[in-house]
Image (cartoon, rainbow, N blue to C red):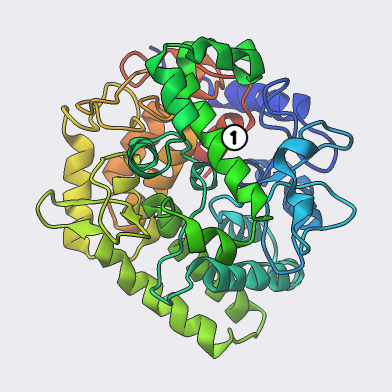
Amino acid sequence: MPKPDEQELVKDLYKVLKINDRKLWTIPAANLYPHQWLWDSCFIAIGLRHLDVDRAKTELTSLLRGQWSNGMLPHIILTLGSRDKEVERGYLNPYSPHDVATSGLTQPPMLAEAVVQIGKKLRSAERRTWYAQMYPHLLSYHRWLYHDRDPHNEGLVLLLHPYESGLDNTPPWISEMRKHSMPWWVSAIESLHLDGLVNLFRRDTKQVPPGQRMSNVEAAAYWAVLRRIRRKAYNSEAILSRSLFSVEDLAFNCIFIRANECLEQIAKAIGKELPADLGQRIKKSREALDQLWDDQHSEYFSRSFVSHKLIEEPSIATLLPLYSGAISKERAQHLVNMLKKRRTFGASWPVPSVPLNSSYFDAHKYWQGPTWVNTNWLIIEGLKRYGFNEEAAALRDRTVEMVAKSGPYEYFSPLDGSPAGAENFSWTAALTIDLLKS
């Protein structure tokens, strides 16, 4: 394939962002995703900063309207009047905002990274003003994550639902759910082969071929987990008192470690000193990542919060310690070697969401095989951080080529680059712009 005309590609990708623009925020894609999602807006802002830095700032400040009074940032801010308000029911929790409908879950904490990336486009005085505006909200969010999601002060935060990981149905979550949180009625639906009935209640499979989404059994089980959490009004202490299903998610914690570093950078730039207890917990998080390394497999895994056992199901998360910056150069080299292995992550197109030799692998099935631009962006950032510039450039070029070839879809086959999921997907467009402009 000839090298894409980068200027024309940027123009086409920017058109996608304009189509999905809702003035203060950007939807991920029309019809399928009608609301504002937390880490989507962060990735979108990272791309938008190259073309309209003020609009990129608005994308992030619009997230703050949904922030709970305890600091939590919800993974969805619902559009006004949406029937999904009764699905999410964030309003059950007394800390939720009164004037905006939100979910009661969170999502990977990409906000501090996005704030810093926008800061790179600003002059020093304007950057300090921008940082000072966002700092209190970031500080509140990070403190909430430690207080609410690291109850034993271990340095690793836990998640209550797979949706919080952003990598919804990756193998570690599916494996853990089947072991500890499979309701009897979902098992009955599966054994009696009645899972087709679930399609009657799903919106996503009306927009995208069912084979490209999570299975009906997985969707039903995830719904059951959400209902249990809702019954506890999203109160983590109450949920954990009876839960067998909470995970110290590897990808989330890697992103959080990097976010903490960005928070420290923001604080320093505006002459603030992080609270001493927060500084201690940030240090502990960097050290605690090593607990997710398994010597036998020479691989990083997520861990069950309840049993403290590693969940030995590989996924793209095992490469994200590169992004965290909290591992040794030797360990980083090992991950780069894994990245290149043809039987695992060395696909023809950018890095798949699970290894090619995984029993879960399906080239077009949501987070069980396809290539996603956002996770590849994280890996590229990690490669550059550890000085693997040649590998970063190669992955950047291949990612851009894939999007130029197939268009800014939600995800792609790592085998042939063919598109899947929603078309005109915002973070694909935005992050490809960033790869072209950075």
Residue beneath label 1, please? 427
Q: Position of residue 381 (x, y in %)?
A: 41, 50
Image side of residue 213 versus residue 251, left or right: right
Image quadrant in which you'd find residue 281:
bottom left
Foreground residue among 59 and 195: 195
Q: How many numbered marks have been drawn onto this rendered protein structure?
A: 1
Image quadrant in which you'd find residue 393:
top left
Asked if 55 appears above or below 190 in the picture, the reply is: below
Task: Identify the residue shown where x is 89% and y is 34%.
Answer: 81
Q: Position of residue 202 (x, y in %)?
A: 63, 19
Density class for disc 1 (Cα within 10 Å; few <14, some 14-19, many ≥20) is: many
Image side of residue 420 versus residue 200, left or right: left
Image side of residue 252 versus residue 341, left or right: right
Asked if 139 appears above or below 56 in the picture, the reply is: below
Q: Amino acid at mark 1?
A: Trp
Q: Position of residue 345 (x, y in %)?
A: 24, 33
Residue 157 visible to an observer of this rendering: yes
Image quadrant occupied by the N terminus = top left
Asked if 282 appears above or below 346 in the picture, the reply is: below
Q: Secondary structure at mark 1?
A: helix
